[in-house]
Image (cartoon, grey):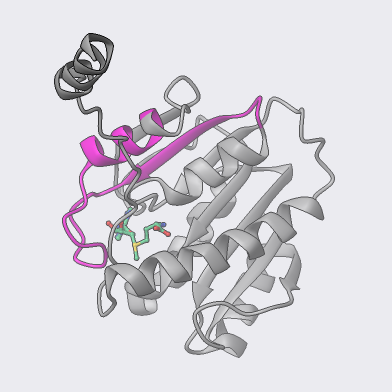
């Protein structure tokens, strides 16, 4: 009886520790649930693309996540390539991801155990000069369609951060797919589409290689 009392009172005083969960946010024109669903599909496609790259999963790759938002793709990369170091940059101001902040991106990386390999920076694709830095793998999801016609300039900037051996895995909504492919083909010698769709048929994943500039 006294034993029962003791365990009952212990249960009462045991601190309730809530498990922290990552939250990669809600996309513009979407709900939290649909955004999470879209990321699940995008993760499958990006993983398929990574499987096809001529890197070993153990390689110490330098990876750049362009328009990283709350770090969804940075974390996918850190998980797939366990020795990689990832830089994610974003303005953290654009309306396409609700209530985004660098603090929340860092929190997600910490919760998932990637804090020591992911660095988040505030930066604008049109202003940031990573020209002195080169990356083995550049990734981006759902960023370039926000730029309208300026996306063609942004595609060129991707090439500046790549070497002849780098790969770019670009997932986006291509409203004018043929025009975008033409522009990308003038910048990259290799433009390959990963089959499968996520978030509707406008979302495609392209693997770009051999930058011409
Ligand atoms: C729809 S969100 C996608 C975020 C993240 N890539 C993902 O898949 O969850 C688009 C992101 O692009 C960022 N962005 C918009 N314009 C940008 C710019 N000029 N430079 C860098 N990031 C930008 C936004 O702040 C936003 O976080």
Horizontal relation, residue 87 to residue 187: left or right:
left
Q: Give the quarter of the image for residue 121.
A: top left
In the picture shown, does residue 9 fall above or below 145? above
Residue 23 magenta-drawn? no
Task: Return the x and y of residue 2 as percentages of the image width and height.
Answer: 21, 10
The number of discs equals: 0
In the picture shown, does residue 121 fall above or below 12? below
Q: Is residue 211 visible?
A: no
Which of the image's four quarters has the N terminus?
top left
Q: Quadrant of ligand 1?
A: bottom left
Q: Nearer the viewer, residue 1 or 134?
A: 1
Q: Is residue 46 visible?
A: yes
Horizontal relation, residue 208 to residue 42: left or right:
right
Q: Give the quarter of the image for residue 101.
A: top left
In the picture shown, does residue 47 fall above or below 176? above
Task: Return the x and y of residue 149 as percentages of the image width and height.
Answer: 38, 79
- Residue sitting at 64 percent across and 59 percent down? 46
- Residue sitting at 70 percent across and 50 percent down? 167
- From which residue to which does the magenta span run? 82-110
Q: Nearer the viewer, residue 19 or 164?
A: 19
- Residue sitting at 16 percent across and 55 percent down? 99
- Residue sitting at 52 percent across and 86 percent down? 200
Q: Residue furthest front?
A: 1
Residue 108 magenta-drawn? yes
Task: Return the x and y of residue 66 as percentages of the image width and height.
Answer: 44, 50
Horizontal relation, residue 102 to residue 144: left or right:
left
Horizontal relation, residue 94 to residue 159: left or right:
left
Task: Return the x and y of residue 208 as percentages of the image width and height.
Answer: 69, 61
């Amino acid at each position: 009886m006294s034993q029962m009392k003791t365990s009952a009172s212990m249960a009462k005083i045991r601190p309730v520790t809530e498990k922290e969960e990552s939250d990669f946010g809600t996309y513009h024109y979407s709900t939290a649930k649909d955004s999470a669903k879209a990321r699940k599909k995008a993760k499958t496609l990006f993983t398929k693309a990574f499987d096809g790259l001529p890197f070993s999963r153990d390689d110490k790759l330098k990876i750049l996540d362009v328009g990283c938002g709350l770090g969804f793709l940075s974390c996918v990369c850190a998980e797939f390539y366990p020795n990689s170091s990832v830089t994610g940059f974003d303005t953290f101001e654009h309306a396409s991801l609700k209530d985004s902040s660098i603090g929340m991106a860092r929190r997600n990386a910490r919760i998932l155990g990637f804090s020591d390999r992911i660095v988040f920076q505030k930066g604008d694709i049109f202003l940031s000069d990573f020209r002195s830095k080169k990356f083995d793998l550049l990734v981006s999801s759902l960023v370039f369609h926000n730029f309208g016609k300026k996306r063609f300039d942004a595609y060129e900037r991707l090439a500046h951060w790549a070497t002849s051996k780098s790969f770019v895995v670009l997932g986006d909504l291509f409203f004018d797919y043929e025009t975008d492919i033409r522009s990308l083909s003038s910048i990259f010698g290799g433009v390959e589409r990963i089959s499968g769709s996520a978030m509707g048929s406008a979302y495609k994943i392209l693997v770009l290689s051999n930058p011409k500039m």
